[in-house]
């Protein structure tokens, strides 16, 4: 193998491992998860929220109706607890009781909101006001029916990219339906956040990161061009030296 071929090989390897290192630093976890999703078709996306409001994302295959994360069990179906220990079964039952109490409180709050509307409906003689009150009562009845169905259903799973997805709170083994925690106040808060995000100019940090990445690409391209130019120059110089010495140099 000639000197120039060795130089090209070394330069190519340096560029390859440099690009590979950048990819691992930027998206290493995402790349690993993409391979897991490709070669583990029966896996599930698992999201665990902790008390600091950080959400950890895992891709795991359930074993005996549960996931094991940080030595803590997270069940996929609370109705199937035969494979759990007594302590784990107690954790599941306690979580289900708290869930039932939480949903029942939401139903009671909706009933409390509905009562004054019914009184206003009986006392009102304005047709437009009657229609508006009836529409609000029907909306509340629809929400109540949704929560009443949740009292009977204990299986809470979603789907992400055609794979089952489960949401948990750290230390609680029962999957969560985050719509249970979604109130009218939350709706207004989310609407305000979305409106501000749409109207707000791009974040300065995002612009700075994008600019740095663009300049890094320019620098890499310039470095590659300089390396190729120096390789050709070195080849020319070596050829000239070999010609002057009358030596046979394999290029």
Image (cartoon, grey):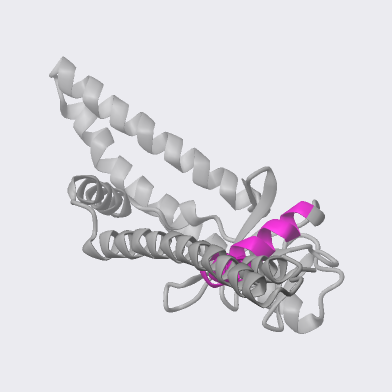
Residue 92 shown left or right of residue 105 in the figure: right
Q: Position of residue 88 (x, y in %)?
A: 74, 79
Residue 76 shown left or right of residue 211 in the figure: right
The answer to whether 136 is drawn above or below residue 14 in the figure is above
Q: Position of residue 167 (x, y in %)?
A: 58, 61
Q: Quadrant of residue 148?
A: top right
The answer to whether 65 is drawn above or below residue 112 in the figure is below
Residue under the image location 52 percent in, 66 percent down: 233
Nearer-the-camera pick, 54 or 85: 54
Q: Position of residue 122 (x, y in %)?
A: 22, 27
Nearer-the-camera pick, 160 or 247: 247
| Quarter of the image that includes the C terminus | bottom right
Is residue 156 magenta-colored?
Answer: no
Is residue 33 magenta-colored?
Answer: yes
The answer to whether 84 is drawn above or below residue 145 in the figure is below
Residue under the image location 49 percent in, 62 percent down: 229
Any part of residue 77 in sight: no
Nearer-the-camera pick, 115 or 2: 2
Q: Which residues are magenta?
A: 14-38
Q: Position of residue 19 (x, y in %)?
A: 57, 66
Residue under the image location 14 percent in, 19 percent down: 125
Residue under the image location 61 percent in, 69 percent down: 11
Q: Quadrant of residue 216?
A: bottom left
Q: Quadrant of residue 173?
A: bottom right
| Quarter of the image that includes the N terminus | bottom right
Nearer-the-camera pick, 87 or 63: 63
Residue 89 shown left or right of residue 19 in the figure: right
């Amino acid at each position: 193998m000639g000197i120039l071929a060795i130089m090209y090989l070394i330069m190519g390897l340096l560029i390859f491992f440099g690009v590979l290192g950048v990819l691992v630093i930027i998206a290493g976890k995402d790349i690993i998860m993409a391979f897991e999703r490709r070669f583990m078709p029966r896996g599930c996306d698992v999201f665990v929220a902790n008390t600091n409001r950080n959400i950890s994302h895992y891709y795991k295959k359930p074993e005996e109706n549960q996931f094991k994360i940080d030595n803590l069990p997270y069940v996929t179906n609370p109705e199937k607890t035969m494979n759990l220990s007594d302590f784990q079964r107690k954790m599941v039952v306690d979580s289900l009781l708290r869930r039932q109490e939480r949903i029942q409180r939401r139903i009671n709050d909706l009933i409390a909101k509905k009562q004054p509307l019914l009184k206003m409906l009986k006392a009102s003689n304005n047709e437009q006001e009657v229609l508006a009150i009836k529409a609000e009562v029907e909306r509340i009845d629809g929400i109540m029916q949704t929560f009443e169905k949740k009292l009977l259903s204990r299986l809470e799973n979603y789907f992400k990219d055609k794979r089952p997805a489960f949401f948990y709170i750290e230390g609680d083994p029962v999957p969560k339906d985050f719509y249970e925690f979604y109130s009218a106040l939350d709706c207004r808060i989310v609407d305000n956040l979305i409106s501000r995000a749409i109207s707000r100019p791009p974040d300065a940090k995002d612009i700075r990161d994008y600019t740095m990445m663009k300049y890094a690409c320019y620098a890499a391209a310039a470095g590659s061009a300089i390396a190729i130019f120096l390789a050709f120059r070195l080849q020319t110089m070596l050829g000239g030296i070999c010609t002057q010495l009358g030596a046979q140099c394999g290029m």
